[in-house]
Every structure is written in structure tokens, then in C-alpha cells.
């Protein structure tokens, strides 16, 4: 004979779990997913099946301060089931990428492929290009060194052994942007430059090893199979306590310094590239030389190249690019995909900010996202605003064709100890979003009885964010524990909705 679970016991379990999050944050157990278990769980059909902690009680227990908003809807009926501040705009962080994915699928289609070309301005005679060779970008966010290596090999297979003219690169398919968000620290790899041609997510690999006379450092354009050294980005080790990194535009290269006190015995990290055209040109020239094709470098072109495409590299279909974008939350991919979609929508390439405004207009008209105001396509900029109600309605509308749901990431829920519970009866596919003192989650949840709900949860403590030094290296004090409690609240709310509406 089973025994019903009292509201007091259920409520106590939930609040106790949320209260434990601060200690768990230090272990990193909560870094990747919402976390907190509302155990024991009432059986569907039991007297306690619809007894769950109130949302306000859960929010108070999470102790986030600032603003917490949410909206949850039935995907079949479109009925709004429960809201809090549903019309209040908050920074969506990387949840923005789910809107970008819908925008790109609508404008470009899931089968769209980005193309990168090797264009000859003259004929090929006896293995010699009687003109210039141009590496022409098409905005591909996934182009890497291995792809350039294959293009160089294809050029050789075409019978080309020399170029009479010069080698140029063209990145004008999309406007150059020095950074995605200028308020971010200079050295973070998730805030690179963007252009019509981009390589290795516009990041360069910096590696160091302590030797007998100091440090040996390398800068390379590594991918899985190839890792050619580059001079477009240069590093000098400086004897100082801080800052950890400094950057200077060296004219024809990115000039970095790093504090020796931060290096230890060895290690590596990715640094952003600020000269993407020159980066791609140097790497391709190195790879072509390995096939005996020596290229004389010329200036980057400002006008689209004219001539015959000797080699064309195509990306994977857009739906696969978007799946990886949502899985790994890559900012550069989101910006390039969004800007390409805007170019198709308005008939010309636009700046990042203008493209974000165009996507905002599309979201308001096509998805009914009232008040949508985005400053980019990735969510990196804190001035973007979306409301929980608008996001939930967009999820309901997108559910009709299933394209977004199919590429969203599984979000595993956890037990009270912080461990992933693979047998958790509530299943979630969603997009997470995190900035310092900003946390968001939007997507779909399926209750044990099969009820499917669309939801959005946004939290932001603007006061604590303003007080933090966001350009300093390292995480601001209190940010990790705040984020852990925010993720704990997300799971607590999801489990509440499963209990209340999943029957």
C-alpha cells in the first residue's frame, strides 16, 4: 500500500535541495545543467499528484535577488499555464541562439550550405594560372585548417602548379566586425573578430612550455589533422604580475603579451584572431606550399572576385551547423548565420547590429515575440532584451514543424547530490544562456505522462552585474554560486510544472 506525500515533505525537500546549491557550486557539479531534485515525487493519479511547492516559494529559496521571470505553455493548445513577469524584458544570453536558429531556418532553409571558393582570374595553361588566385569566403562559420588543406590538395589535383599573378583573399561577403561585444575582455576566445572569411572560429592556438632559459611559445592554426605555425598572431612572455594578457594591433599581426607569473610549467589556450582575412591567407599559403604551389601574397580584395572557381568547399547543411551551434553555444557561428540570414532577407549584407535589428523585426512579426530587441545573434551583448512570455510563445509556434526541437540539446536533470540522473522521469530539450549574474533556459519539457510543455525562464541581477569588473580575468566573486542557484531554480520550476500540469 503506497502512502501519499504531504505538501510539507515535498516543499521541505525542494527548499533543502536549493539551499545546498552554494556548497555544490564550488565543486563544479552544477556547471552544465539545471540542478535540484524535488524528491520524493508524487505518483500520477495519487492524491498528492498536483501538490507542489509554489513558484514564489522556490524563487525566494533560490535567493538570486534582481529579477526572475518565467512562462510555461501547453504546446498542443497554446494555453499559457503559468507566468511571472512574462512581459518583462531581460537579457536572454545564449538563449538568443534559439531565435537565431529559427531565423536562419526560415530565411535560408535547413539544406543551405556555405561555400568557400578558390577563384582564378585567368585561364590555367600548362599548370600555371595566368592571373591571380583568390581565396573567397562565403561566411562559412565552420571553415577550418583541415578544410583549407583539402582545398589546397584539390588545387594540386586540378593540375595547378604555379600562379603567375598574386594570391589574394576576399572576406567581403559579410562586413568585418572587430569584436562581437566590445565590453568583453580582449583575450577571450568566445569574442573574436568576424568577417566574410573565418578560420578555426577565428581563434589561434597559443601553447607554452617552460624550458631551461625561459618559456617556449608557439602560435598555430590547429585543427584535427593539421597545425601550421602562424606569424599573424605573435606572443611575448613578459615579467610581470598582471594583467595576464595585453593586446596591441601590430599592423600586419596581432601582438600579444602574457604575464610569466600566470603560466606555470606549461599549458595552452585559444586566443581570438583580429585579422581573419590575413589569418586565412597565411594558413592557405602555407598549405599550398606543401604541394609545391608557391604563392606571392597580395592585398586583401574589397570587391567580389571575378573569374572561374577552380575549387569549391561547402559546409555541412545548415541544420547540422545549427545543431552544433546550439550544442556548443558558439558565438561566432550565431553571428555569421544571423548576418547571412539578414543578407538574404533584405538583399544585402548588413553590419552585426543592423542585422540584429532585422532579426528582432522578424521575431516580432513572424514569431509574435512582442518587445524583442536584440543587439546581436549570439546573446553575448547584455543589452539584448527578450521576455519569457515571448520566448515561450515562440517555442509553441516553432513546435509545429519540429525543426527547432530536433536540434536542441538534451538537458539532463540531477538528483539532490548534484549527480546527473539519467532515469529522471522529466525530459528536457532546451537552450541555456549564461552571463555573469544572468541565467536563462528556454525549450521543451516532457512530463512522465507524455504532456509536453514549452517554457522560458529568465533571471538577472543587474545590481551585482554592474558591481562586477567584467573586463577583468577570472570570474567575479559570487558569480559561480549565483549561477548554480539559478540553475537549481530552473530545475525546481520544471519539476513543479511537471507535477502540476503533467496529468
Image: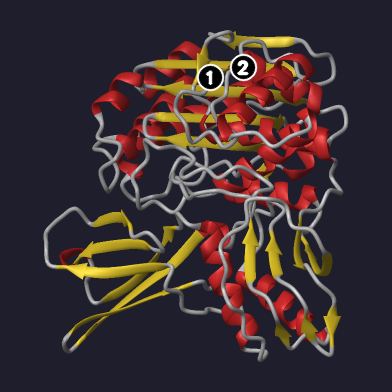
Report the side of 268 relative to 95 (left or right): left
Res 446 label: none
Pointers 1 and 2 in contact (C-beta within 8 Å)? yes
Q: Callout 2: 10 Å neighbours few (<14), some, many (20+)?
A: many
- Nearest the eye: 174 or 190: 174
The residue drawn where x is 74% and y is 32% is 103
Q: Is residue 501 above or below residue 216?
A: above
Quarter where residue 337 is shown: top right
Identify the mark at residue 385; answer none if there is no mark.
1
3D distance between C-alphas at marks 1 and 2: 6 Å
Q: Residues within 10 Å of mark 1 (few under 14, many from 20)?
A: many
Q: Position of residue 230 (x, y in %)?
A: 46, 74
- Residue 259 shown left or right of residue 284 in the figure: left
Residue 491 shown left or right of residue 43 in the figure? left
Looking at the image, which is closer to me, 464 or 279?
Answer: 279
**275 on left or right of 311:** left
Q: Secondary structure at mark 1?
A: loop
Q: According to the image, label 2 marks what residue?
A: 372
Q: Is residue 20 above or below residue 494?
A: below
Callout 2: helix, strand or loop?
loop
Residue depicted at 72% across the width and 30% down the height? 447
Amino acid at each position: 500500500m503506497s502512502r501519499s506525500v504531504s505538501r510539507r515533505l515535498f516543499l521541505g525537500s525542494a527548499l533543502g535541495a536549493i539551499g545546498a546549491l552554494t556548497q555544490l557550486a564550488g565543486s563544479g557539479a552544477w556547471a552544465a545543467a539545471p540542478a535540484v531534485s524535488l524528491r520524493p515525487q508524487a505518483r500520477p493519479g495519487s492524491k498528492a499528484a498536483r501538490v507542489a511547492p509554489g513558484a514564489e516559494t522556490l524563487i525566494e529559496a533560490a535567493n538570486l535577488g534582481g529579477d526572475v521571470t518565467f512562462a510555461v505553455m501547453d504546446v498542443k493548445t497554446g494555453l499559457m499555464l503559468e507566468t511571472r513577469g512574462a512581459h518583462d524584458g531581460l537579457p536572454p544570453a545564449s538563449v538568443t541562439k534559439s531565435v537565431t536558429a529559427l531565423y536562419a531556418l526560415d530565411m535560408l532553409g535547413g539544406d543551405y550550405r556555405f561555400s568557400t571558393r578558390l577563384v582564378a582570374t585567368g585561364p590555367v595553361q600548362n599548370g600555371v594560372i595566368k592571373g591571380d588566385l583568390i581565396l573567397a569566403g562565403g561566411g562559412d562559420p565552420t571553415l577550418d585548417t583541415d578544410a583549407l588543406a583539402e582545398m589546397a590538395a584539390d588545387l594540386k589535383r586540378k593540375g595547378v602548379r604555379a600562379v603567375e599573378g598574386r594570391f589574394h583573399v576576399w572576406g567581403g561577403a559579410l562586413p568585418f566586425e572587430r569584436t562581437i561585444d566590445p565590453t568583453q575582455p580582449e583575450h577571450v576566445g568566445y569574442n573574436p573578430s568576424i568577417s566574410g572569411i573565418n578560420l578555426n572560429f577565428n581563434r589561434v592556438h597559443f601553447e607554452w612550455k617552460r624550458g631551461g632559459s625561459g618559456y617556449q611559445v608557439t602560435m598555430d592554426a590547429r585543427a584535427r589533422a593539421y597545425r601550421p605555425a602562424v606569424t599573424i598572431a605573435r606572443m611575448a612572455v613578459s615579467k610581470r604580475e598582471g594583467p595576464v594578457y595585453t593586446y596591441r594591433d601590430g599592423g600586419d599581426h596581432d601582438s600579444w603579451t602574457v604575464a610569466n607569473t600566470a603560466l606555470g610549467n606549461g599549458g595552452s589556450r585559444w586566443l581570438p584572431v583580429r585579422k581573419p582575412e590575413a589569418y586565412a591567407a597565411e594558413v592557405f599559403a602555407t598549405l599550398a606550399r606543401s604541394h609545391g604551389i608557391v604563392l606571392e601574397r597580395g592585398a586583401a580584395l574589397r570587391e567580389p572576385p571575378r573569374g572561374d572557381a577552380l575549387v569549391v568547399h561547402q559546409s555541412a547543411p545548415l541544420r547540422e551547423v545549427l545543431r552544433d551551434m546550439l550544442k556548443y553555444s558558439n558565438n561566432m557561428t550565431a553571428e555569421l548565420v544571423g548576418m547571412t540570414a539578414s543578407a538574404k532577407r533584405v538583399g544585402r549584407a548588413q553590419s552585426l547590429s543592423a542585422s540584429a535589428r532585422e532579426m528582432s523585426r522578424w521575431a516580432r512579426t513572424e514569431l509574435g515575440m512582442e518587445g524583442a530587441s536584440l543587439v546581436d545573434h549570439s546573446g553575448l551583448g547584455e543589452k539584448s532584451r527578450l521576455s519569457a512570455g515571448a520566448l515561450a510563445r515562440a517555442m509553441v509556434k516553432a513546435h509545429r514543424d519540429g525543426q527547432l526541437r530536433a536540434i536542441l540539446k538534451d538537458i539532463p536533470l540531477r538528483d539532490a547530490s548534484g549527480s546527473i540522473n539519467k532515469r529522471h522521469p522529466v525530459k528536457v530539450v532546451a537552450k541555456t544562456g549564461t552571463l555573469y549574474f544572468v541565467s536563462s533556459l528556454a525549450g521543451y519539457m516532457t512530463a512522465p505522462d507524455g504532456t509536453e510543455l514549452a517554457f522560458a525562464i529568465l533571471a538577472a541581477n543587474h545590481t551585482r552585474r554592474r558591481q562586477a569588473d567584467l573586463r577583468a580575468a577570472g570570474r567575479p566573486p559570487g558569480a559561480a554560486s549565483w549561477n548554480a542557484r539559478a540553475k537549481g531554480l530552473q530545475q525546481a520550476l520544471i519539476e513543479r510544472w511537471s507535477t502540476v500540469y503533467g496529468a
